[in-house]
Amino acid sequence: MKSISYILMAAVAALLIVLPYVGDLASQNLAIKVMIAAIFALGFNLLWGQAGLPSFGHAAYYGIGTFATIYAMEAIDKGGFLPTPLLPLVGAAAGFVFGLIAGWFATIRTGVYFAMITVALAELVSAIAVKWEGVFGGESGLRSIRSDWGPFAFQTTTSVYYLTLVWAVLVMLFLYWLQGSPFGLIVRGIRERELRVKFLGYDARKVKTLVFALSAAVSGLAGGLLAISDESANMVLFQGAGSAFVVLNTVIGGANVFFGPVIGAALTTCFGYFGANLSHFWMFYLGVAFVATVLFAPEGIGGAIVERARQVRAGERALLNLSDIANLSALIVAIVGLIILVEVTGTICSESYRAAVASGQGVWPAVKLMGLSFNPLSPLTWIAGIGGLLLGTWVLLKQGLAKWPSFLRRTELAQPVGTGEAK
């Protein structure tokens, strides 16, 4: 299995290197957004997955890194000297400084109180950005342009793509090294047994503050790459949606697997890119995927892949069998049923559809979906949607791919230790 993993990694690396030569500008822009989202998710997971500290306001450091880099780009344009390839370090430095301050306050408390402090700090930054128009540019935000550096030109999308790729690789190598370093072991020790780490003589709060700052620095670096790519920054970066998306990416990909956040960021970014062109309800589908992952696969997609690889290596199951094919077929049926229900219901409830009905003097026009026409008044439409969703879900539960949530399972009596069967 290790050889297969190395082959896959080599194939992905080769694809990323040759992408500008085989893809168009749209694919390069999408790849840039995926890599930036992956760096952001890896930075967030350093705090959540490694240290066990749930931050729900990480968009603040992402946005601060973006604005700091925009100001650095303006300084270069006015004659300041800073190599353009090193501009993301400005965002990282800004994120680190602010993260050090925010982390010192947030680590005063633990658990849910820590999480609420991170939310409060993010809201504070967002409120300041709204009021301080002279610094953050108000609703229009700030703009700047990329400058060339020596023989290197950064005016094309391809150059930005390779710059982002280099930084993505460097960040992954750094975080992978940090994970296995003595500091990384202490961080994971705090996540598992903070009291024991304190007994060993370490100042747990200082360690948590430092890892908070490092996480904010990686997030700020991602923001710096966004500033170079878009040549702009605005207050939308500070909104709660950014913090929510990085949590969603990490949960879907898997917080306990190093490349899990990368997988989640790639899937959600591509889904948003293509889904927005296919349906007005793509955010709903993304929310359903998030809820389903939390309920039925809390280890995430990356965790599921790692577990399947472990089972294959141990000889417990084959890489692909008939049960997997049945589960995949049932999943497709359930998804198609859900899409029919959502699209038909959403379309007939929209103002444009009601206007079309009124202009047609009471005639209900067909709903176009996946190249097919569905009559919203036909029982077959609703039977196909409801039946597909229920049938697919039932097969998944029956086959064991998905497990009933704990609150729906039958409660069993605990077996007393050493006493045999409970009476």
Image (cartoon, rainbow, N blue to C red):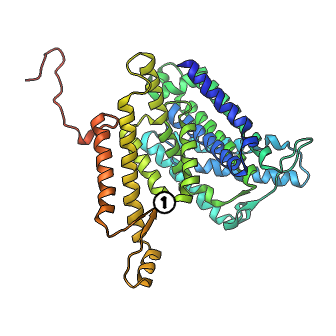
Q: Is residue 386 visible?
A: yes
The image quarter in which residue 324 lies: top left
Q: Residues within 10 Å of mark 1 (few under 14, many from 20)?
A: few
Residue 348's place in the image compared with 51, above or below, is: below
Judging depth in this view, the residue of 401 and 320 nearest the camera is 320
Q: Residue furthest left?
A: 423
Helix, strand or loop at mark 1: loop
Q: Residue furthest front?
A: 372
On the rendered structure, is 173 left or right of 73? left
User: Which x, y percent locates residue 253?
Assistant: 50, 38
Judging depth in this view, the residue of 23 and 418 nearest the camera is 23
Judging depth in this view, the residue of 195 and 417 nearest the camera is 417
User: Which x, y percent locates residue 44?
Assistant: 56, 40
User: Which x, y percent locates residue 340?
Assistant: 39, 58
User: Which x, y percent locates residue 188?
Assistant: 51, 26
The image quarter in which residue 5 lies: top right
Residue at point 43% right, 67% down? 367
The image quarter in which residue 412 lies: top left
Specify the quadrant that holds the C terminus: top left
Amino acid type at circle 1 is: Gly
User: What residue is pinned by disc 1?
Assistant: 371
Q: Is residue 405 visible?
A: no
Q: How many marks?
A: 1
